[in-house]
Structures are given as C-alpha cells and as structure tokens.
Image (cartoon, helix red, strand yellow):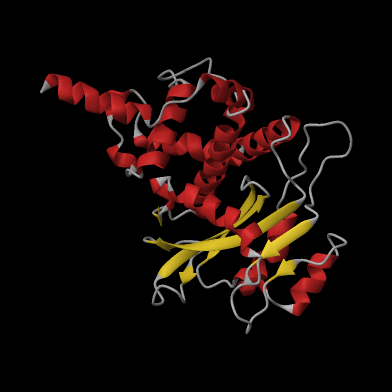
Amino acid sequence: MGGVSRSRRSVRASRGKVDDGLWTRIEPLVPVVQRRYRHPGRRCLDDRQVLCGILFVLHTGIPWRFLPQELGFGSGMTCWRRLRDWNEGGVWQRLHELLLAELRTTDMLGLSRAAVDSSHIRAMKGGPATGPSPVDRGKTGSNHHVIVEAHGIPLATITTGGNRNDVTQLIPLIEAVPPIRGKRGQPLRRPRHLYADRGYDHDLHRDRVRRFRSPPPHIARRGIEHGSGLGVYRWVVEGTIALLRWFRRLRIRWEIHDDIHHAFVTLGCALICWRRLKLSL
C-alpha cells in the first residue's frame, strides 16, 4: 500500500512540474519582493515551488483549498496570491510574447495566415465577463475567443461573457495580437490572411478587417451550403481550443475574478507555445 501511495504522489506531483528550460525563461520575469528589515515575518516560499502549485491547479482543476500540502507547493491561498500578483505584473503576458519570439526565431511561426474561433464554458460562480449563454439554455458562462497562426500556435485570447457574439470580438482579437519579435527588422503583428467561420460573417466587420491588411478576410458566408473549403485552414484553431480544454481548470470557470481566470488562459497559451518550442531544442 505504501508503494502505491508513493506512486500516486509522484504522478500527482509531476502534473505541476516545471521544466528547467521553462523556469529559466520565467525566473527573470518574476518580480523580486524585498523582505522587510524590521518584522520580516515568515520567509516567503520559493517562487518555483509556488509555480508548481499553480500549474498543478491548472492541470488538475482542483480547488485551491484542496491543494495537497504534502507536495510542497505551499497553500492554495499562497499560490492564488502569486498568480494574482504575477498577472498584475504582466508576467504571463510577457512569457507568452517571449515564447512567440523564440518560435519565430526558429522559423516555427507561420504568420502568413491566422484563424479565429471561440468556445463557451460554464461559469459556476458568475462574476465579470460572464453572461447568459444562448448555447447553454441561458446558464451563466464565458466565451474564450482565440486567434492562432497557421500551425495552431495561439497568438492572443479574449475572455467575454457567454452572451457576446463572436463577430463583436473580431477586431479586438486582431488588435490583441502582440508585436512578435525574434528576428531583425520590424516586429510582426498582422497576419496577411484571416480565416473564420460563418459566425463572423458581417459586411461591416469585413470592411474593418480590411484596414489591417490588404487582402480581404476569408469568412464563410451565411446561407450557403457547407463545403466552402475554408475548413482546411480553420481546423487549427479548433485544435488549439481542444488543447486549452486539456487543462481541466479551463473546462469550467470557477473564478469569480475575470483577471484570475484570464491569467490561467494566458498561462495555458504559454505552455502550448513552450511544448512547440521544445520540439526544436
């Protein structure tokens, strides 16, 4: 029995493991908190251990209060505070941009085209960026709007209420793509071709998208039969959404604060980028 329990603990702990390569990229981004000279209090837990706890919650979807203490990741509240503080400091967004730049350096980023789509999740506790979902019998939920490049690497995400139409987030999603460095010259930001399903079909937004690029967007028309051929390019965004759902914490929204939930989404996108990057290392 003791061997079985030790084996289970090792498997559970591996879900929050931080690769050395990933940590070398995150550590310079983490703000250094100076310890007080007078009344210093208890020494803060190591940042890498806390990050392991955050990743454990992201992978397993376990509530913060049930984070196993025997794993050595600290308490759930400690991990929650670090996730909040690091998100306010822009750690997760900068990590995502850093990994995108490295992917471009290794020629693994295809910005010749991009695809957009969204997915709905249930929001159990409500909060900002939630709303009655028309696809879930009016239950409270949130939408994840995602834009990816040609190979399905996430470029940006937006979290909105479940009642927001996809087409309303098309322009904000394009504008959310950060400048991607990694090579000499001007950073890239606007993919040349954009692909979307018929949920984004609106002439007004087609004209607005043209302001960002010379070719018109490739959006399926409503009222026509399926088989436009655009699915050959759009399937990558559906695969990326499936990868985000692989993180159990992103299948159902438990966070009341939308910034905490979006921090998880951004961290999930960064981890997807890191897995792609490891293929070239």
Q: Is residue 102 left or right of residue 123?
A: right
Give 66 or 133, whichever is nearer the viewer. Answer: 133
Farthest residue to the bottom: give it. Answer: 223
Q: Is residue 155 left or right of residue 138?
A: right
**Residue in the picture at 32% in, 43% down:** 62
From this view, report whether residue 150 is shown above or below residue 87: below
Relative to 117, residue 32 above or below: above
* Horizontal side, residue 202 vs residue 11: left or right: right
- Which of 122/19 is in front? 19
Please state if 6 lies on the left or on the right of 278 as rendered.
left
Q: Is residue 121 visible?
A: yes
- Which quadrant does the N terminus fall into? top left
Q: Position of residue 144 (x, y in %)?
A: 54, 58
Position of residue 204 measured from the top left corner of the image (x, y, whole percent): 77, 77
Identify the residue at horizontal 70%, vertical 70% (top origin): 219
Q: In the picture shown, does residue 191 fall above or below 172? A: above
